[in-house]
Amino acid sequence: MSDGLYTIGELARRTGLPVRTIRFWSDSGVLPPTGRSAGGYRLYDEAAVTRLGLVRMLRELGVGLEAVQEVLARRVTVAEVARLQLRTVDAELRALRARRAVLSLISERGTSNEETLMLHRLSRISAAERREIVAEFVSGTFDGIELDGDAAVIADWMRELPDSPSPEQVEAWVELAELISDEDFRRRLRRIALAGAGPLPAYELRSRVLAEAGPALASGVDPASEAGRRVLDLVAGPAVDRAALLEWMETVADERVERYWALLAALNGHQRSEPAVPAFTWVIAALRAHGTGS
C-alpha cells in the first residue's frame, strides 16, 4: 500500500477475495480504480474497499452485477434489491421442495422410466399452470350447472393446489391428473352434479350408511336376507322414497369419485374421510333385493 492506496493484490490479501474476482469486478465497472501507479497498476482507496465489501455482500446474496451497479449508482436501494431477490429465492425454494418431493417419491416407489419422466414433468408445472389445468376441468365438467353442495366444494378445493407439495401430495397430484383426464369420469361427475340432492341429505345418509350398513357388511350379513332388510329399514327409514334413493345412490356410489375426494383431501391437507362406497354398494344391493316400496 502506498499513500493510502491499494493494488488489486493488496485488496485480495486484505479481503480474502481472489485477485481474478476483484479484477473481473473492476473490469465490469462495479469497482472502478481510484487511479494508476507509475507502472500502470490499478490502485484503490478506502472508499473502494468499502464499495468492494458491499459488492461482495450483494454477490454472495445472489444479486446480479447489473443490479449491483444500480445500487452503487443509487438508482435503487439495497432494500428494493433485497425484496426482489427474496421473491427469486422463494421461487427457487418452492422449485427445490417440489424437486425433493419428486426424488423422494421416485426413491420410495421405484417407478419406471416413463413414470419418472411424468413425475418430473408434473413437478415443473407451476402453481398457476396447475390451477389452469384444474380450472379447465371444472369448467368443462360443470359447464351450465349451478354449482352448489358437493359440486361447489369440488370447484373450491380444486383451485387450492399446493405450490410446494410433499411426496404424498405429488403422488396424489399425479393420480388426480390422470383421473381428471378420463372423459368417462368427467361424465360421471357431471351426472352427480345434475342429480342434485337425494331424498335424504347427503351427510345424514352417509352417516346412516356407515353406522348401519358398514357393520353389516363387515359381519357378512347378506343384503337380501331378513337381517339385511332390517338394516335397510334403519338406513332408509319409513318415509323415504326408496326408488328415488336407489336411483340417487347408483349415481353417486362410484369408487373413482370416492378416490377423487381422497386425492383432493391429500392435496389440500384435509383429513381423509372413511371409505363409504362398499357400504353404499351393500345398501344398493339391499334396495334391489327387497324392492323400493317404502
Image (cartoon, rainbow, N blue to C red):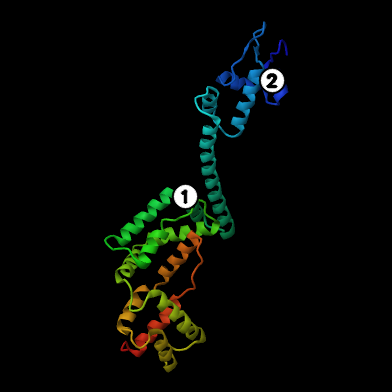
Which residue is at a point 47% across and 66% down the rendered structure image?
A: 262
Element under disc 1:
helix
Q: Nearer the viewer, residue 165 or 239?
A: 239
Above or below: residue 160 compared with residue 69: below
The picture places residue 70, in percent across and down from the top left corner, at 51, 25
Q: Earlier in the sequence, mark 1 or mark 2?
A: 2
Callout 2 secondary element: helix
Q: Say above or below: 117 vs 186.
A: above
Q: Residue at x 36, y 65 (%)?
A: 151
Q: Are marks 1 and 2 in contact (CB under 8 Å)?
A: no
Q: Is residue 198 above or below residue 14?
A: below
Q: Is residue 246 left or right of residue 230?
A: left
What residue did someone put label 1 on? Answer: 121
Q: Quadrant of residue 104?
A: bottom right
Q: With 138 as the anchor, is 100 left or right in this view?
A: right
- Residue 288: x and y in percent read 35, 86
Image quadrant containing the N terminus: top right
Q: Position of residue 29 (x, y in %)?
A: 55, 19
Q: Nearer the viewer, residue 178 or 274?
A: 274
Foreground mark, 1 or 2, reads 2
Query: Which quadrant of the figure contains the C terminus?
Result: bottom left
Please name the residue shown 48% across and 70% down the image. 273
- C-alpha separation, residue under disc 1 versus residue under disc 2: 47 Å
Bin the neighbour count of mark 2 within 10 Å (Cα to Cα): few under 14, some 14-19, many 20 and up: many
Count of picture labels: 2
- The circle on residue 232 is none
**Which residue in the protein does label 2 denote?**
11
Q: Residue at x 61, y 33 (%)?
A: 60
Q: Quadrant location of residue 225?
A: bottom left
Tell me the kind of residue under disc 1: Arg
Q: What type is the residue that disc 2 sits on?
A: Leu
